[in-house]
Image: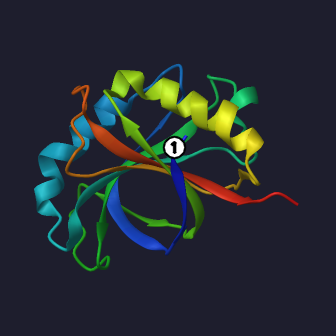
Amino acid sequence: MDYRIEMLPEKKMVGKQLTMSFTTDSTPKLWESFMPHKKLILNTMGTDLYSIQKYPEGFNYQDFDPNTLYTKWAAIEVTNFDMVPNAFETYILKGGLYAVFKHIGSATAFQKTFEAIFIEWLPQSDYVLDDREHFELLGEKYSNTNPNSEEEIWIPIRLKN
């Protein structure tokens, strides 16, 4: 499985958030509330979008209860928080060490890539999960239902003790 390790600096984000579980996935609802209004955010840093997940402390994919609640953000990076439209919230994405994987395929095929990361790659790597945000970077090659869609999956890691 191809990946790279990156040290990510802290990022200022503006977006919308929802609390959900894997069972009650509200991701489409979240993005439907974000996308029509994102043009109101004037101080963006590029056009890449971020799908950010903040899981409860101690998240472990293999033992994770699909009914456990977590927070998901639909967001875009901004230069500062000076011009935040009323419909949006601010969020600081913590920096740190990340393993970055490329997912090619539609959103429905995402689960296979996710499982390969957490069941195959992570246990055999020199890393363990860190208690920080997970996110997907949705760049210009991202197209939700397209089988050739590309996105990056960023997993927070730290070296094993």
Total marks in image? 1
Q: Position of residue 3 (x, y in %)?
A: 52, 51
Q: Which quadrant of the rendered structure holds the C terminus?
A: bottom right
Q: Residue placed at 23% from the left, 26% from the top? A: 145
- In this rendered view, identify the residue nearer to me: 33 or 79: 79
Q: Quadrant of the N terminus?
A: top right
Rendering coords of residue 101 (x, y %): 48, 47
Q: Position of residue 32 (x, y in %)?
A: 22, 35
- Examine the image and state in which quarter residue 130 appears: bottom right
Q: Residues within 10 Å of mark 1 (few under 14, many from 20)?
A: some
Q: Amino acid at mark 1?
A: Thr
Q: In screen coordinates, is 116 left or right of 28?
A: right
- Asked if one can make out residue 63 in the rendered structure from this viewpoint, the answer is yes
Q: Which residue matches tag 1?
A: 71
The residue drawn where x is 57% and y is 60% is 98
Q: Tell me residue 26's x, y (percent).
A: 39, 28
Q: Quadrant of residue 95?
A: bottom right
* Image side of residue 64 versus residue 102, left or right: right
Residue at image location 36% in from the left, 65% down from the top: 13
| Of residues 101 and 136, the one drawn nearer to the viewer in this rendering | 101
Q: Is residue 30 above or below residue 46?
A: above
